[in-house]
Amino acid sequence: MAITQTAKQSIQQRLSLKAQQQLKILALPLTDLLANMQQAALDNPFLRITGPNLNAIASRYPIEWLADSNALHQSLEAYLTTQVGLTMQDLPLRTLVQYLIRHLDGNGYLTVTIPAAAQACGVDQVTMTDALTLLQQLEPAGVGGRTLSEVLLLQAQRDHTAPPGTETIIQTQLTVLAENKFGLIQRATGLSTSQIQTVLDYIRTLSPAPGAQFTADTPTELAFPELKVTVQQNTIAVTLAADTQIKISFNAQYLEELSHYARDDQDFQRYLRTQERAYHSLQSAYAERQNTLLHVVQLIVVRQHAFFTDPSQTLQPLLVKDIAEELKLSPSTISRTINGKYLEFSQHVYELRHFFTYRSTVGYSQDAVLTAIQTLIGREDRRWRKV
């Protein structure tokens, strides 16, 4: 039997929401993830979340291990600048991207025009447009947009599950959509009323201010390591830290009992199945997060093998796109994975971003260049230094 158009739209919408949940779960640091899941348990009477005892974990570590001094106050500019260093080679375009970052407002909108930016930097407008394109590929999606329409469009373009007609409506019918004039949109796009409603519901999930989540005045939580790297006889092992895992369970027996006693109540039956689907979706998203984390760190260990066998060694040049290409994932997915996630190694806690370092123009990592400079300074004859 053929699937009806309405059923297809419903399936596609569920897929879109599932993909959004997976990306959200992937991006959340442990403390935020635990809070998110505990809220889900409050909304779902059949869901139970057994989380790690963060206080107990903190008591086992020196507090200086868990305090991430580099991330205590992170602004949008700092977050984007870090991504630029991790994803872009040291080329002229990178300097232009950094210039544009400095001209974003608190919501992530670009406040300078392309002609003005090109003139200020002494380049042509085509080159500056290329720099803007690179900026708009960074996280969070939508950053670097110049209008509400562009901000929403940038988010939708990254989501392969966006409903059909989304880009067209955002580009040409956003004002009409806000006024709920579906008839005008139907005539302009050829979409049905149900398709337009699906697009409207989807657009409501997008952020009109992608940069607003960042503030330089909001401290982050402690850095609890979710992975452990150990070395025994030059063999490196990567494991998920058992004490930071979250257990998700579902009381299926209780659900079936309620379903049996209220089998004639169709609305209640739909409610029960919705709660069951929510559990499976959350469980799947969490499993995908942990699997991605493990694979990313395993590959980091391979690329930074010298460091893990001898921590006195400098880090090798490594970009986010290198890991993305190896794992056949998007750079934005890798950025979500490494941001705010930590591993424990050799009695230290490291943020995953620590192992990514951009290349200098001669092919050395930033870490290696800084080490060489420190060595040269240490070799200076102090008698020749000016007082």
Image (tube, helix red, strand yellow):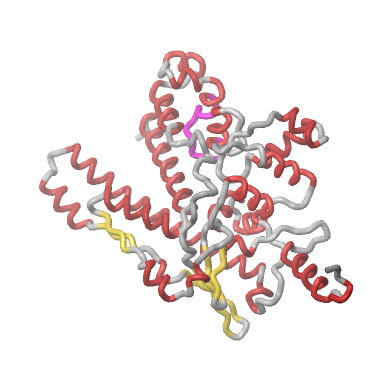
Against 179, residue 349 (above or below) is below
244 or 264, nearer to the observer? 244
* Quarter of the figure with residue 32: bottom left
Can the viewer see residue 79 in this picture? yes
Against 40, residue 118 (above or below) is above
Report the residue at 23% width, 42% height from top.
271
Was residue 159 drawn as part of the magenta stretch in this picture? yes
42 or 113, nearer to the observer? 113
Residue furthest to the left in view is 261
Residue furthest to the right in view is 384
218 on left or right of 109: left
Where residue 199 appears, as percent x and y from the top left, is 44, 29
159 or 131, nearer to the observer? 131
Question: Where are the magenta residues, as a range?
Answer: 157-168
Question: How many circles with numbers are drawn on the protein?
Answer: 0
Where residue 313 appears, as percent x and y from the top left, is 71, 75
Report the residue at 69% width, 77% height from top.
312
* Quarter of the figure with residue 339: bottom right
Where residue 73 appears, as percent x and y from the top left, is 54, 53
Was residue 262 drawn as part of the magenta stretch in this picture? no
Quadrant (top left, top right, bottom left, bottom right) of the C terminus: bottom right
Can the viewer see residue 296 in this picture? no
243 or 117, nearer to the observer? 117
